[in-house]
Image (tube, rainbow, N blue to C red):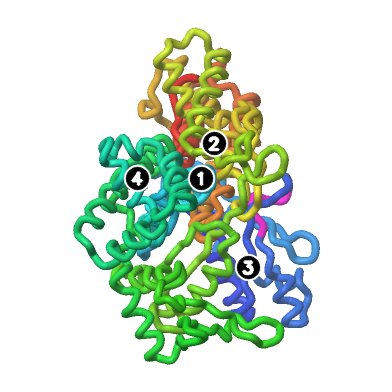
Amino acid sequence: MNIRQHLSDHFQAAMRAAGIPADCGPVVAPAKKAGFGDYQANGAMAAAKRMRTNPRELASKILEQLDKGEMIEKVEIAGPGFMNIHLSEQWLSQQLLTARGDKRLNIVSVETPKTVVIDYSHPNLAKEMHVGHLRTTIIGDALARLLEFQGHKVIRQNHMGDWGTQFGMLLEHLSDKLADSNAEVALADLEVFYREAKVRFDDEEGFADRAREYVVKLQGGDEQSLKLWKQFITISITHCEEIYSKLNVTLKQKDVYAESRYNDDLPVLVKELVDNGIAVKDQGAIVVFLEEMADKEGNPSPMIIQKKGGGYLYATTDLAAIRYRANQLKADRMLYVVDARQSLHLQQAFVASRKAGFLPESVTLEHCAFGTMMGSDGKPFKTRTGGTVKLAALLDEAVKRAEKLVAEKNPQLDTSTCAEIARKVGIGAVKYADLSKTRTNDYLFNWESMLSFEGNTAPYLQYAYTRVRSIFRKAGIEPDELEGEILLEAPEERALGIKLNQFGEVLDQVAKDTFPHVLCTYLYELASTYMRFYEACPVLKEGVSEKYRQSRLQLCALVARTIATGLDLLGIEVMEQM
């Protein structure tokens, strides 16, 4: 149920019936202050200015035409034309009861599902995943989970780097290593392996020439070279899958559609662009000049798609990927969860693909840009020695720190239970600390704040869930055994009922705008609203009538399920005790 959309539809119809121009619509939002209704509808003032009439009088005309239905109890006009909406208590209660009996919490699947391709994670298979891969991986996965929950067909595309000149260097080094050990042993530590190969490439006489020969053989389809390359890729992907498993990320090997998959299409694509006059030869290279992205002096933005020596670039591969996703995967919407520093590159690819006619106008291309994870010094997150932080090491550290906190908080836990809780808390803390920030901003990585059991953190929400669940253990009853109506008589009950009913509109907003922090904020507000309800409205206290006990327990059950569902959409697990 999307309350905001339902109200918008009602007020839109009333405005048309009141004779207001079609391009003037209502702006509906939850009320921010107590006493001003549950929602506010603005639009009368803007329309009145357009029509040169009195806004309060126009608001009155809108309300005369408004079909309140069962949803709206009353609407009051405030100030110069604000319309304060009070929702019906009976309607709110009925929506909650429907959610109680529905495994999807009354969240209806979209009427017209779209095919959404999400490009995220894309590590380089020559190296181990590091902290620079964290944001793209978890933001992309949260969006994939949420859009799937809504009923869309989501196609994950892990555009891994598995091609290019560096692989000649790596394969030549691996070829030599295989004389002393097998590939699994040689590639046990990808970072060490890469550094060894790079040192040999820079310093060892003859190595660079042999590496370049490997590139030629690889690109030419040499059987032995391809066999060695496939070994390297398989072992590298296994490293990535271990990280995805630790992170509780849904990416699988079947989602890998790496750079090499487009190799055969690159010369075809370049020829097509040249033949159609989209690309031209310039100083030996093939370039697409984008007038649509011209600078202040009118100079078009150059996008090289083939180097002077005949090699292809990331731009060429990205154009091929867009064409493949539009024509083969039949995407309606493409989301690129990529570092903000790649904005120009992606914008060029998007504009060029439109210009070349690679996809219908109806298909949307969206860059879901994100900022940088910073250390406490305000600089990009590094090790103490200035090196790149491996993602596996970061996650292990998170679990280790969480285990210490969990053991201090609940020393009665046995070792295995404590370890399992610590895993969920530690990984959840790292993910939530990122997802709860506006993705376009940089953010400071701080162990103390992310692992805190207070404030807008994963441990706080996980603990809130366990506290709600403990109520049912104390009451000796399961949520599905509850019955009766849900009463929203106390202000805190009503506030909680409204907040629970807003879950659907929050999911719709995240799906539309691709900002997961909106869901995080909602879950934190829900937990905080629940705490106020629990303090003001006794649930199991002696003297509470069975009618109110059943009603309040149903609210508790809905809170627990909503928190668990929301966290699951973020890829964060809950537990029954902490």
At label 1, the amino acid type is: Leu
Residue at x-position 37% and y-position 51%:
170
From mark 2 to mark 3, how far is it between C-alphas? 39 Å
Q: Secondary structure at mark 4?
A: helix
Check the image and report above or below for 545 versus 175: above
Nearest to viewer (mark 4 / mark 1): 4
Crowding near the residue tagged with mark 3, few <14, some 14–19, many ≥20 C-alpha atoms within 10 Å = many
Q: Secondary structure at mark 2?
A: helix
Nearest to viewer (mark 1 / mark 3): 1
Magenta residues, start to end? 35-40
Horizontal side of residue 152 vs 305, given as left or right: left
Residue positioned most to the front: 205
Q: Earlier in the sequence, mark 1 or mark 3?
A: 3
Given residues 47 and 215, the one toward you in this image is 215
Label number found at residue 26: 3
Q: Quadrant of residue 513?
A: bottom right
Nearest to viewer (mark 2 / mark 4): 4
Circle 1 is placed at which residue position?
A: 134
Circle 4 is placed at which residue position?
A: 236
